[in-house]
Amino acid sequence: MGGSAAERGMVIVGAGECGTRAALALREAGWRGKVTLVGAETHPPYERPPLSKDAILSETPVAKAIAGAGDLTAAGIDFRPGVRVAAIDRPAREVVLEGGCRLPYARLLLATGAQPRTLALPGASGENVAMLRGLDDAARIRAALGPGQRLAIIGGGFIGLELAASARRLGTDVTVVEALPRLLSRCVPAEIAAGLEARHRAEGVGFVLNARIAAITALGVELADGSCIAADLVLVGIGAAPDTTLAAAAGLAVENGIAVDDRLATEDPSIFAAGDCCSFPHPHYAGRRVRLESWRSAQEQGTLAARNMLGMNEVLAAVPWFWSDQYDLTLQIAGLAEGAATTVRRPVGEDGFVLFHIAPDGRLLAASGIARGNAVARDIRLAEMMIARGLCPDPAALASPATSLKKLLAA
Amino acid sequence: MAWIRACSTDDIDAEDVARFDHDGRTFAIYHSPEGAFFATDGLCTHEQVHLADGLVMDHIIECPKHNGRFDYTTGAAKGAPVCVNLATYKVKVEGDDVLIEI
């Protein structure tokens, strides 16, 4: 187990948004030793959010690079695409690659992300079933979109609804099948979900809510009442599960994600975890353990983990932030609304609005907004800063478009 | 190159931004907290989102979509996800008119 920290180097498993940002952040923070970035996919690191939106509209989906192979080389990052990790040998402080090669580490970052949840139903692994996580998935789904094609989407969450909007723009027949009574029930307020549902219906998307699915067959989605939603492709978008296999096999604690502290360190001081794969105690939410599937959180956590791998000992306190684009509507959410006692509504422009979710003690917990274009962006950003500062803004002032949120922030 | 009137000085609050379109191009005009005016290209260099919907804090404009940040007085990109600087344009104020050189 010899070698200096610089010789052993930093190893990052997972070359998505989080892992790639971490690799770059190690260099930005001044680390001159080895950095190895191991990715299971064969593509250079790319941004995933466009895969359900703009990228899938073009006939051959093209990914927007986070950093090109040349950029990584220029930064002195040893990028290993198409490589899977078999195990972590903690006593030796080595990552074991499939095929048996070993990478020694001084510090290891697990940025393994999440994998789409699979349906436990007859036919769920059939050839007419797809899920969207990577660029190759997007290319396969894209080939089944267009006029005369029928797409059934199981799951009325972000992925399903963004794909529904993109598929409609390409002229595809779309039906969304959701087990719960409404869309986006996990983290979007009912008023916003209802507005999105109305827009999707106006665009020609069909919905089956409260659905009981019996099976996926060659014809499409078979419901428990015997009816069938005919489809050429069935897209399953029912959420994602953290990829904790390596960590669990190495004996690290898993609690809805690889359990890390507020500095993103696991119980092993040489091993950190960040992004979709980890859960951490959030200081703004009473230390409640949260796991975030968010593009911006992946960046923030990757950057912070990199700095802490170098001993900077920084606390993760960023307010969670999410967005979704469907048609010309953009939804933005800052914070976590769970536990809110009151919600006030602030109109934005002609038909947009922001909901502010307030805790029993008056603290602002979260804000969720929707409008055409980016009309809610400033209000959501200012709300995010209020949440970060633990402010208790006057609810009536929040609700009034005549009140400047910037002034409330400064007050 | 010519000086083009973009707006009036009172069209933009202090520490705020507005959109200006001219001849098929789009710009963002800024009014700094100190009362000075600045101009940059309108679209973020990351994903072509218009910056006029973004938040101005002091001398920083933040993209409304992905929080890319620029110093609007110099156009300098201030870190991920933006790495390409914004083009800036000369600005002068004549009476109540804000003019930019394009």
Image (cartoon, rainbow, N blue to C red):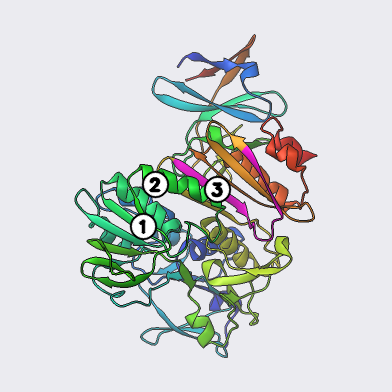
| Amino acid type of the residue that numbered disc 2 sits on in the rendered structure | His
**Dot 2 falls on which chain?**
A
Q: Is the N terminus of chain A in the top left, top right, bottom left or bottom right quadrant?
A: bottom right
Of A154 and A42, the residue lying toward us:
A154
Q: Secondary structure at mark 3?
A: helix
Q: CA distance from mark 2 to mark 3?
A: 14 Å
Report whether A390 appears left or right of A247.
Answer: right
* Quarter of the rendering containing residue A199: top left
Residue A202: x and y in percent read 37, 42
Q: CA distance from mark 1 to mark 2?
A: 10 Å
Q: Which residues are magenta?
A: A329-346
At 58% from the left edge and 80% from the top edge, which residue is drawn? A254
| Amino acid type of the residue that numbered disc 3 sits on in the rendered structure | Glu
Q: Is residue B66 in view?
A: no
Judging by the rendered image, the residue that carries numbered circle 3 is: A191
Earlier residue among tags 1 and 3? 1
Earlier residue among tags 1 and 2? 1
Q: Is residue B13 on the magenta stretch?
A: no
Q: Secondary structure at mark 1?
A: strand
Report whether A341 appears left or right of A107.
Answer: right
Mark 2 touching mark 3, by CB under 8 A?
no
